[in-house]
Amino acid sequence: MTPTPTAAAAARFLAQASMGANRAEIAKVQSLGYAGWIDAQLAAPRSGTRWDWLVAKGYNALTNRNSENGFDACAWRKLISAPDTLRQRVTLALSEICVVAIDGLVGGGWRSFSAAAYLDLLEDYAFGNYRALLGAISTSAPMGQYLTFRGNVKQNPTTGALPDENYARELMQLFSIGLIQLNLDGTPKLNNGVPKETYGLSDITGLARVFTGWDFDMAGLDANTPDFLRRPMAQVAKRHETGASTFLGSTVPAGLSGADALKAALDIIYAHPNVAPFISRQLIQKLVTSNPSPAYVARVAAVFNSDSRGVKGNLAAVVRALLLDPEARSDSLNVPGAGKLREPMLRFIGWARAYNASSATDAWAIGNTSDASSRLGQSPLRSPSVFNFYRPGYVPPNSAVSKAGLQAPEFQLTNETSVVGYVNYMQRAVSKGVGDVLPDYSSLLPLAANGQALVDEINVVLAAGQLSSASVGLIRGAIDTMSAKTDAALHNRIFAALTLVMAAPEYLVQL
Amino acid sequence: MTTNTSRRAFLQRASMLAMSGVAAPLAVNLAAMAEASAATASDYKAIVCVFLYGGNDYANTLVPYDAASYNAYYALRSTLAYQQSALSATVLNTAAPPVDVNGVAHHYALAPELAPLLPIFNAGKMGVLLNVGTLVQPTSKQQYLAKSVPLPSKLFSHNDQQSEWQSSMPEGATSGWGGRMGDLFESGNGNATFTCVNVSGNAVYLAGKEAVQYQVSTKGSVPFSAFQSPLFGSASCSNALRTLITQQHSNLMQSDYARVTQRAISANDVLTSALAGAPVINTAFPANNNLGDQLKMVARMISCASTLGAKRQVFFVSMGGFDTHDGLVKVHPGLLKSVADAMAAFYQSTVELGVANQVTAFTASDFGRTLSGNNDGSDHGWGSMHFMLGGAVKGGRYYGKAPVVASEGPDDVGQGRLLPTTSIEQYAATLGSWLGVSNTDLLAMLPNLANYNASARNLGFV
């Protein structure tokens, strides 16, 4: 019988498995246990879609066609308030592996709906099958827009124009197998000490032939409503390359329909042994730690390759395995190289969830938080390119992490501007909320007069108890100098304590 | 912090050189030390890397203009091509047109949207570098096809070729050649922090072995609100914040984060006061042009270089959107206009500040693109065309070899993906030499430069 997790241990688990801890969720983990909590989340009903919310709020009015109105709101709303918190966390992780960004969703208007459709689609498959996910994104209108294969045509012998290679390249490099042949544990396969590349230029030009003929499915629709953006794209047979396509040592035979050629091509890619370690390691990095041991990656990749029923690509089983793995559950508080930097969005969302932030008018007017000098330097579905906000292998130069031979992806967003912009933003957010999104500090107010109790409580819920007693003492000492006489004074103590905890490196690095 | 950081950087370098004695002969160490002190220059020079993320389409940037080349260009990308008549106003006239492998002379025009750069070229302050790209060594097409010589790894991949351009290594590199030049010069700067300055996001280009890039926003450094006024009215809380965010930890990531924060605080104090005393720049920079905003910040920092004690600086700015697989005709001209407006204003601002001869800006990008189009765009390529601007540039002319305009011709590896005839390390070495980096140090910081004849390492454009 597993002992009941402490509140701090439950909060640590929730930092990996959810959009952020709060007292209610901590209690659930304590009563259900880690595995029980995961199973309950896997079984939980899906929260409503972003698309339906946009429609309900009237964003499908024609005046919004050429705008991004509503998108940030519909994304933040789910990130902050959806009860299926594990599904939201996996969806966020997938949105940073199979990347689409709203500024590239062009050519059909209704960018908010295209972006919402993409996040809804990822959410459909968050606990589903990775092969099915690849199939769905490879015919999704937003991906067709973002990686420019919508409208792609077969080779034109007259003009010499060849098929656009964009999706063929990034599908293999980023969404499935990567550039280097991998062992099951995620380490590179070496040939005389040199990593072996997975494919070359001819594989790209070969695969590009498959991604021809796809375009919006406008049957019975017009562009005055956004509905075509959530339909899978349709084939235009005359634009599809019907000759054979050879890549990765296999051939998609000539004469197949566009849909059949796509299925055959994805089967070839999906059969590559890289898929399991390539995707498993990135999911571990996004949920648990930047530097999983090869053995940890191998254990999770083995589940990716074959779940309890022998099925490959069961994401629910993969997520369960990576969260329950001994390496995820063991205490890493005193391991120098341990942890991952919390990405800025998760810090903000973690605060909002810890104190049940809500939008009284259901406007969720947080907006685009990309500006690093005054906001978070990161915003949902607003990566600067298909390479995400940061690369899984990013090594901050001239760093202790670098000297130790480790990786720290989220440090790609960390610089002299963003470290200050973030603290200033949180200082405003914890005290004034953002837009109409306001926190509920009723859980903290009774503690606010007692500096020690206040900081201890914030340390457990937000920082999983990671702040050292010295840091807690430092903060408590400062809070204790503040007046506790009025309601406003008590609130100032809460604001200051939250700002200080959330600025502390001991909080910023999730251990 | 000001002088201490510099002194520490110098001493650190000295001790590292001493410690590396096991691996390197003493004479080399002494030579390197001599260079390090020689790098303590009394004058001022800066290079500015303008990185075009996504892989700029070379053929619609520097457009083939002589009849034979233009016709070949048009035949290979009729749906993407500029009309020849649209190019007549931006033809680059030069006494000695570049020749290709067959000895045939080539003429080019700038894309019409690059017109703001034409007067700078005509004034002899802008040069054009033809077909430059990532290479390990001089490579013929035959060698490429036979794979008989080492090639840069992961060709045609964005992130890796960005990294190869910036560092000579694929993604995962921890230092770039801008930063490695910074290593040599930071001890000669009054404040080492401002040696390698990034007005864009983090880039490996500016990371040295020791030099650390400093990131500044287009509006300058950002101060902590809590240090400007007490945190929720409590000076004690502001003080606690300062301690909390700068103290060191045994966890490596916590330590690294705190180090960045410490640097942000120290640099903000120095830079804010230096910028406050800097001259007003009257040159009009283009509105709604982020690259222009970045370059204006570079100009502002250059304007207070003497206050900062800076003698040698390496700057990095960037712009995205060049991955024009789709909609090239719709998108690319606007991108080029932004680049030209921003770079022309930047050059003008250096003239205004009286430092034009001391500042050299140059373009770089992931790779060039295919010459033959897909339906409405072009795909990832290799070699490309780039520009060098500044008062010290021997401009009004071309450097490098003109590629034959073709698909499956002598200079491309298919679809007009150019096999570079000039290496980025020659490009880097030329800029480094101008800054005052010795030949010995260039060979140490550019791993493939030794594969080029000594006489070919400096392209001579500055």
Image: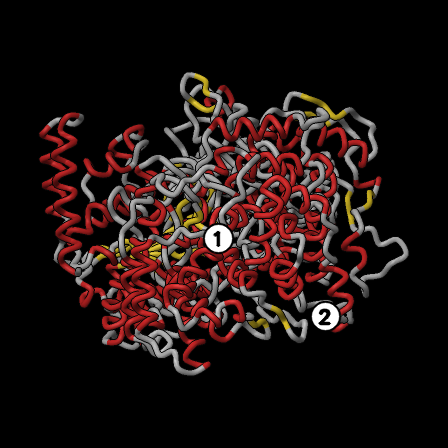
Q: Is residue B11 visible?
A: yes
Residue A483 position (above or below residue A111): below
Q: Is residue B404 visible?
A: no
Front-lying residue, B40 or B455: B40
Q: Badge 1: few (under 14), some or many (20 or more) residues near its Cα, within 10 Å?
A: many
Residue furthest right as drawn: A220
Q: Say what amino acid the circle numbered 1 marks.
A: Glu
Label annotation for residue A343:
1
Q: Which residue is mark 2?
A: A64
Residue B256 position (above or below residue B21): below
Q: Residue at x 28, y 47 (%)?
A: B431
Q: Say what amino acid the circle numbered 2 marks.
A: Asn
Q: Give me the C-alpha separation between circle 2 and circle 1.
A: 31 Å
> Where, quadrant-wise, is the N terminus of chain B in this rendering?
bottom left
Q: Residue at x 65, y 37 (%)?
A: A168
Q: Quadrant of residue B36?
A: top left
Residue A233, percent from left and from top: 79, 47
Q: Secondary structure at mark 1?
A: loop
Callout 2 touching callout 1 (CB < 8 Å): no
Residue A241, percent from left and from top: 77, 34
Q: Residue at x 48, y 46 (%)?
A: A9
Q: Badge 2: few (under 14), some or many (20 or more) residues near its Cα, within 10 Å?
A: some
Label annotation for residue B120:
none
Front-lying residue, B80 or B203: B203
Label total for image = 2
Residue A48, percent from left and from top: 74, 58
Front-lying residue, A227 or B31: A227
In which chain is the residue bearing label 2? A
